[in-house]
Image: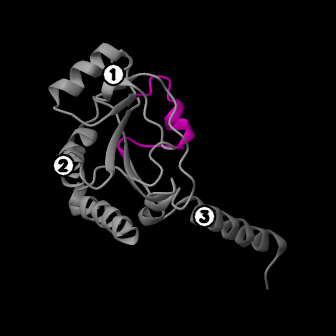
């Protein structure tokens, strides 16, 4: 026979398990967060690697695929992804696909535009980079981790999101993002 204290204990344990179950999402769900939502427009006037360092708008890119990557130069996982971004920039350059970096600083020295420009040059980054010194784009995209990669389709809808290093532990992120881009291009031929 259950007394009221014991029943209350079981009830509280059940509620705790349910709350924890909803709070801890599997990794695949975390990576898919934001998928199929409209991509927020990029804000900010400080750009590198664009003609005249002029801003790029997603609205002006409508009809084209965009690979948007949030990074900061002091992040080793961000640096590990650089070769994939360079590969995509080369592979898709003639197919209306553009890689755009959004440099959102974590540390004080990463906030200085001169430091960012020097690191972009040192790291050999040739694709456009938006300096998100106040984190406005980070917040608009509800980004949580460096690095995070978004694939934005021709209608400016987020079709894929990858949080973290693309190949950490053999994760296969490079192939997944590449496949998403190719599928978007094939659907609009």
Q: Which residue is mark 3?
A: 22
**Nearer the N terminus, badge 3 or badge 1?**
3
Q: Residue at x 25, y 64 (%)?
A: 175
Given residues 117 and 144, the one toward you in this image is: 117
Where, by quadrant of the figure, is residue 79 drawn? top left
Q: Quick check: 29 left or right of 51?
A: right
Q: Which residue is mark 1?
A: 52
Q: Residues within 10 Å of mark 2 (few under 14, many from 20)?
A: some
Label 2 vs label 1, nearer the camera: 1
Q: Residues within 10 Å of mark 3 (few under 14, many from 20)?
A: few
Q: Which residue is mark 2?
A: 90
> What is the spatial separation of the Cα atoms under label 3 and label 1, in whole angstroms?
48 Å
- The stretch of residues the image draws in magenta is 131-148
Q: Secondary structure at mark 1?
A: helix
**Nearer the N terminus, badge 2 or badge 3?**
3
Where, by quadrant of the figure, is residue 101 drawn? top left
> What is the spatial separation of the Cα atoms under label 2 and label 3, in whole angstroms?
41 Å
């Amino acid at each position: 026979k259950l007394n009221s204290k014991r029943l209350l204990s079981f009830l509280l344990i059940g509620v705790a398990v349910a709350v924890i179950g909803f709070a801890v999402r599997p990794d695949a769900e975390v990576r898919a967060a934001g998928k199929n939502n409209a991509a927020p427009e990029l804000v900010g006037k400080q750009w590198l690697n664009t003609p005249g360092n002029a801003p790029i708008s997603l609205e002006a890119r409508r009809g084209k695929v965009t690979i948007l990557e949030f990074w900061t130069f002091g992040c080793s996982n961000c640096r590990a992804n650089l070769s994939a971004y360079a590969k995509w920039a080369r592979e898709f350059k003639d197919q209306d696909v553009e890689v755009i970096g959004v440099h959102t600083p974590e540390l004080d020295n990463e906030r200085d535009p001169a430091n960012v420009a020097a690191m972009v040059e040192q790291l050999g980054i040739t694709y456009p980079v938006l300096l998100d010194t106040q984190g406005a784009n980070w917040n608009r995209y509800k980004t949580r981790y460096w690095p995070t990669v978004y694939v934005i389709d021709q209608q400016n809808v987020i079709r894929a999101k990858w949080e973290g290093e693309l190949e950490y532990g053999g994760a296969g992120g490079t192939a997944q993002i590449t496949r998403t881009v190719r599928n978007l291009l094939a659907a609009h031929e």
